Amino acid sequence: MPPPPSSTAPVAVLGCGLIGESWSALFLAHGLDVVAWDPDGAVLAALPQRVERLLGQLQALGTGTAGHGRLSVVQSVAAAVGDAGWIQENAPEKTAVKHSLYAEVEAAARPDAVIASSTSSLTWSDLAAGVVRRERLVTAHPFNPPHLMPLVELFAADAQTLARAEAFYRGLGRDTVALKKDAVGHIANRLASALWREAVNIVAEGIADVADVDAALVHGPGLRWSVIGAHMAYHLGGGPGGIAHYLDHLGPSQERRWATLGSPSLTPAVRQLLVDGIADEAAGRSIAALEADRDRGLMLALAARQTAKQGEDA
Amino acid sequence: MPPPPSSTAPVAVLGCGLIGESWSALFLAHGLDVVAWDPDGAVLAALPQRVERLLGQLQALGTGTAGHGRLSVVQSVAAAVGDAGWIQENAPEKTAVKHSLYAEVEAAARPDAVIASSTSSLTWSDLAAGVVRRERLVTAHPFNPPHLMPLVELFAADAQTLARAEAFYRGLGRDTVALKKDAVGHIANRLASALWREAVNIVAEGIADVADVDAALVHGPGLRWSVIGAHMAYHLGGGPGGIAHYLDHLGPSQERRWATLGSPSLTPAVRQLLVDGIADEAAGRSIAALEADRDRGLMLALAARQTAKQGEDA
C-alpha cells in the first residue's frame, strides 16, 4: 500500500458529474478531505449518496486507507478552493467555461494550490490562456471511471508542478504517464480513436458485424494490451531479435497493411449500421445492466493486476 | 466445462513452430490425439518437451479435460493427415508454400477432413486458389499464443464448414468470430495495425516516449478493451441515449480527431526511436523475462475472466 498524499489540506472538486463523483470517491478512500462544488444544486445534494456507492466498490477492491476522508459540499467556488492544496477541475469541455471558472479559482485559491484539469479534449495550451499563474496548471486526464481505471495522463509546462502531480496521483495508486508536449486527445484517446476508426471501417465495409468486431477486440488484442503495450508486443513478436528484427523483417508489411486501413465517414448509413449492430450485441440488456457487467469485469481485472503486482514486488 | 469436440479422430498439426506447438497443447489438453509434422526434424524432435511446458500452463488454469490426448510426431504429411478429422496448418506465410502443402494434404486426407489454416496475413481467397475441394477450407486465425488467447477468427465460403469450425473451436473453449467476407488481417490485426500506426506516430511526433505510450494503453484503453469492445464503450459513453446519442453529439468531434491522427513511415529515424524506446521500457529485462511477465499477466487475466463467466452463468 503506497503512503497517502502527504498534504493534509483538502482537495477541491469542481464539477460533480460522473468524473467529479469518481475522483471524489478515490480521494476520500485515500484519507483526503474533499470539498465539492457544482453549479447544479441537485447534483451537489445527490453527491454524498452517489459517492457512497463508489466507495463500496473501492472497499471491495481493498483500495485506499483504513479511514476515509470527509466530504463537504459547498455553494461557491471560493468556498471550495479557499483551503485546498489540490484543485481537480471537471467542468464542461468548453474553453470559455473553464477560463471563467479559473478566474474565480485564482481569486480565492492559495498561491501554492495546484489546478489540475480533467479535460479530455482540450489541451494545456488551450486552458493556460485563461490562467494567470500558469506554472501551477496541469492537465490530469483520467480514464473513465477514474476511481477504477488506473491511468492519469499528465502535462504541465512547469517541471515542479509535473513532479507534484506525479507524486499526488501515484500516492492514490494511479499509473501516470507524462506527455512531452501537449496534444489533442493526449495519448490514450488518440490510440482509441485510431482503433475505432478501423472498427467502424470494418463494419462499413461489410467485413464483420459490430458484435464480432467487439468480440475480436476483447478476446484478442484488448486482452493482450491489458497486459503489455502495443510497442512491447511487437518487441516480443520479433523473436530473439526483438523490435529491431521485427521492424527490419515485418516493418514493410505493416506499412502495406496501414495502406489498406479505411477512412470511413459517419454517414447516416454507417450510423444506422452501428446503432443496429449495438442493438444486436446488447441483446436486450439495458445500459445500466451493461454498465454493471463492465464494472464487474473491470473489478475482476483490477484484482488480477493487484495479484500480479504483488508477485513482482515479492 | 464445455464438452470436448465430438470427433475421436486425431488432429493433424502441420508446422510445429510457436503456433503449432501452442495449438498442439490446446488440442491435447482437451483430450484430442495429435499427429504432428514439421519439415524440420529438430523442431519435431523437440516438440513433446515444448508442449509439456505449455500443458503445465493449461493445467494451472484448469483448462481442458482430466485425461490428455496422445501426441505423435511423424515424418511425412501423408502420415500426419491420413486419419485426421481436423487438419491445422501453420506453415510459413507464403502462398506457394501453403499451396504445395495443400496438394500433399489433399492427396492423403480423408474426404471429410477440414483443412484449417492459421494464416495471419493471407486471405481465404489467396489459399483457396491452391485447394481442389475448397468447400472444406477454413481460415482459423488464432491470436498468439493460441493455447492462452481465446480468440479464433474464422472465414469459410461453405456455411457447413464454418459451422463445424465454430463448434470445433468453441469445444476447445475458444471465442470465435466469423468474418462476412475475407479481408487482409482479418479483424484483430486490422485493429492492432490501426492502433499501432498512431502509437508510432505519437513517438515520431515527440508527444510521448515508447514506454509512456505502452503504459497509457495498458492502464487505460487496453484494460477497458479486455472487458468491453470499442463499439460498446461508445454505447456506454453516450449515457442513457447510448450509441445513437453518442454519434449525434460526439460523432463530428470523433471525425475531427480522426483527421488529426498521423500517417507515419518507418524511416530509419523512426526505427531508431522505437528501438531506443523499447530498450528504455525493457530496462534490462531479457526477451525471455518479458515473455514470462506477459504469460503470468495473461494467465491472471484469464483466471479473472473465468470467474466473471462463472458469475454470469450462476
Image (tube, coloured by chain):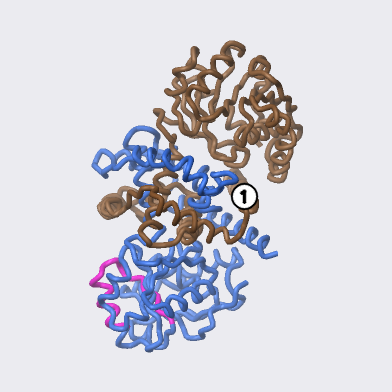
Chain colours: A brown, B blue
Q: Residue at x 49, y 71 (%)?
A: B25
Residue B252 or residue A152, whichever sits in front: B252
- Considering only vertical position in the picture, is B167 above or below A14? below
Instruction: Please give left or right for residue A53 compared with residue B94 in the image.
Output: right
| A300 with respect to B277 (left or right) | right
Vertical arrangement, residue A27 with respect to residue B106, above or below = above
Q: Residue at x 40, y 79 (%)?
A: B87
In the rendered image, the residue lying farthest to the front is: A268
Question: Label 1: which residue?
Answer: A291
Residue nearest the observer in this picture, A251 or B151: B151
Subunit under mark 1: A
Looking at the figure, which quarter contains the N terminus of chain A? top right
Q: Secondary structure at mark 1?
A: helix
Looking at the picture, does residue B312 appear above or below residue B280? below
The crowd level at tag 1 (other Cα within 10 Å; few <14, some 14-19, many 20+) is some
- The answer to whether residue A38 is left or right of residue B100 is right
Residue B87 counted in the magenta span? yes
In the figure, residue B62 lies in which quadrant? bottom right
Front residue (pair A89, B117):
A89
- Residue B76 visible (yes or no): no
Quadrant in the picture for the C terminus of chain A: top right
Residue A14 at x, y percent in the picture: 61, 25
Nearest to the observer: residue B312 or residue A262? A262
Image spot of residue B174 (x, y percent)? 51, 68
Q: Is residue B231 magenta?
A: no
- Residue at the image position 47 percent from the left and 40 percent from the top: B250
How far across and how far down the image is residue A292, in percent? 65, 51
**How many labels, in total?**
1
The vertical placement of B164 against A212, above or below, is below
Q: Amino acid at mark 1?
A: Glu
For the question of whether residue B8 can be seen, the reply is yes
Q: Bounds of the magenta span?
A: B86-105
